[in-house]
Image (cartoon, helix red, strand yellow):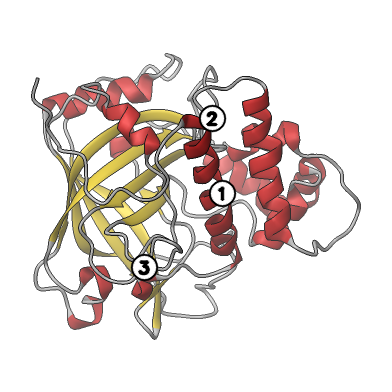
């Protein structure tokens, strides 16, 4: 998890209960004290500071559901269109660490999406990103708490039972990344007046082997085998905010109750049969950068954690692309799904 990656870089700065500029402090932690420290230690190619363990990269398509209710015909979901997609499944652990009980993440990049985007300088890029993980809440409420927590993480956990409980709940065995429910954790605008969170649920997946949780790379092996066998269909859901008090916008430890507001199926992510190890597919996926702010104006992220992710993810992508010799900026067209020999 993120804590395992950053615990060695956190330290007691001071005993203050307030951080003057939490986003700047978090950027220094993730970029200078984590990513750049690994570069100085010889990491090559340069990796992401978190969610760096790759489970697999796959191509697919994102099909918006036909005949949605009018209240859901917003932004990306306004029309029943199909978008090419590339996805990156990962774990929040360094190479060599066991995967058992670690957080799984999914980055989705859609291509061919028209409209003004939120992220400078990519306002006119044809891409939209989604980022999700296999737990519905974060371990702290906001950017202020996150910066304070990493000043002395052990002391923070000792003083915050909610963080301790969430971290324990996040350490769950994952049978397969494809069988996992995934959540956006942070909320987003849904048009001018509403807010939402995103969720993914498995719909149709191939049967896989019983997992050997102690085998290195078992999640990648499972993903490879299942996608070689059959097409995968995942429901992309929108959970609308129905109550300001019980569905807060900047309290990330608070789960939005799915009884109060049931997630609604608005699109289907389809991953066709493919060999995820073929022709540098993983290499292509590792050059992609994901940012929750790379989205349409109608879906702008909300809250201080979203503001922090905007800065940190953008800075991290720039470092990786500079040091790895990649072209800066978003790809204008997607990589072909099938490359012939």
Query: Would you identify the image quadrant in which residue 188 lies?
Result: bottom left
Q: Going from the N terminus, do you reach mark 2 or mark 1 first?
A: 2
Query: What SS does tag 1 mark?
Result: helix
Which quadrant is home to the N terminus?
Answer: top right
**Which mark identifies residue 155?**
none
Relative to 162, residue 271 above or below:
above
**Is the C-beta separation of discs 2 and 3 under 8 Å?**
no
Circle 3 residue: 117
Residue 338 is left or right of residue 190, and the answer is left
| Foreground pick, 279 / 222 | 279
| Mark 2 neighbour density, 10 Å: few (under 14) some (14–19) many (20 or more) | many
Circle 1 residue: 315
Give percent across and percent down for residue 160.
75, 52
Which quadrant is home to the C terminus?
Answer: top left
**Which mark identifies residue 93?**
2
Residue depicted at 30% across the width and 42% down the height: 87
Query: What SS does tag 2 mark?
Result: loop
Residue 47 is left or right of residue 60, and the answer is right
Relative to 214, residue 20 above or below:
below
Q: Going from the N terminus, do you reach mark 1 or mark 3 first?
A: 3
Between the C-alphas of marks 2 and 3, the distance is 31 Å
| Foreground pick, 305 / 326 | 326
Give percent across and percent down for residue 184.
42, 56
């Amino acid at each position: 998890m993120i804590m395992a990656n950053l615990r060695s870089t956190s330290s007691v700065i001071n005993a203050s209960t307030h951080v003057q500029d939490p986003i700047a402090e978090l950027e220094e932690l993730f970029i200078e004290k984590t990513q750049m420290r690994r570069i100085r230690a010889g990491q090559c190619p340069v990796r992401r500071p978190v969610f760096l363990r790759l489970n697999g990269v796959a191509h697919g398509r994102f099909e918006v559901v036909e005949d949605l209710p009018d209240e859901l015909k917003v932004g990306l979901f306004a029309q029943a269109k199909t978008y090419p997609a590339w996805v990156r499944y990962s774990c929040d652990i360094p190479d060599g660490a066991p995967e058992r009980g670690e957080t799984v993440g999914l980055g989705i990049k859609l291509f061919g999406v028209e409209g003004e985007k939120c992220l400078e300088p990519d306002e006119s890029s044809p891409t939209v990103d989604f980022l999700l993980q296999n737990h519905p809440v974060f371990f702290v409420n906001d950017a202020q708490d996150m910066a304070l927590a990493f000043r002395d993480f052990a002391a923070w956990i000792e003083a915050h039972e909610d963080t301790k409980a969430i971290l324990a709940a996040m350490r769950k065995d994952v049978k397969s990344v494809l069988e996992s429910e995934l959540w956006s954790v942070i909320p987003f605008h849904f048009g001018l007046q509403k807010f939402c969170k995103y969720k993914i649920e498995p719909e149709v997946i191939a049967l896989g082997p019983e997992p050997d949780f102690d085998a290195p790379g078992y999640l990648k092996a499972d993903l490879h085998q299942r996608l070689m066998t059959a097409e995968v269909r995942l429901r992309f859901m929108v959970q609308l905010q129905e109550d300001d008090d019980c569905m807060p916008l900047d309290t990330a430890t608070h789960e939005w109750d799915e009884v109060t507001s049931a997630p609604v199926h608005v699109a289907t992510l389809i991953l066709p049969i493919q060999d995820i190890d073929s022709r540098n597919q993983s290499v292509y996926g590792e050059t992609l950068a994901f940012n929750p702010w790379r989205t349409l104006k109608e879906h702008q992220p909300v809250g201080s954690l979203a503001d922090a992710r905007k800065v940190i993810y953008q800075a991290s992508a720039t470092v990786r692309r500079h040091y790895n010799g990649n072209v800066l900026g978003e790809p204008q067209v997607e990589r072909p799904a099938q490359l012939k020999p």
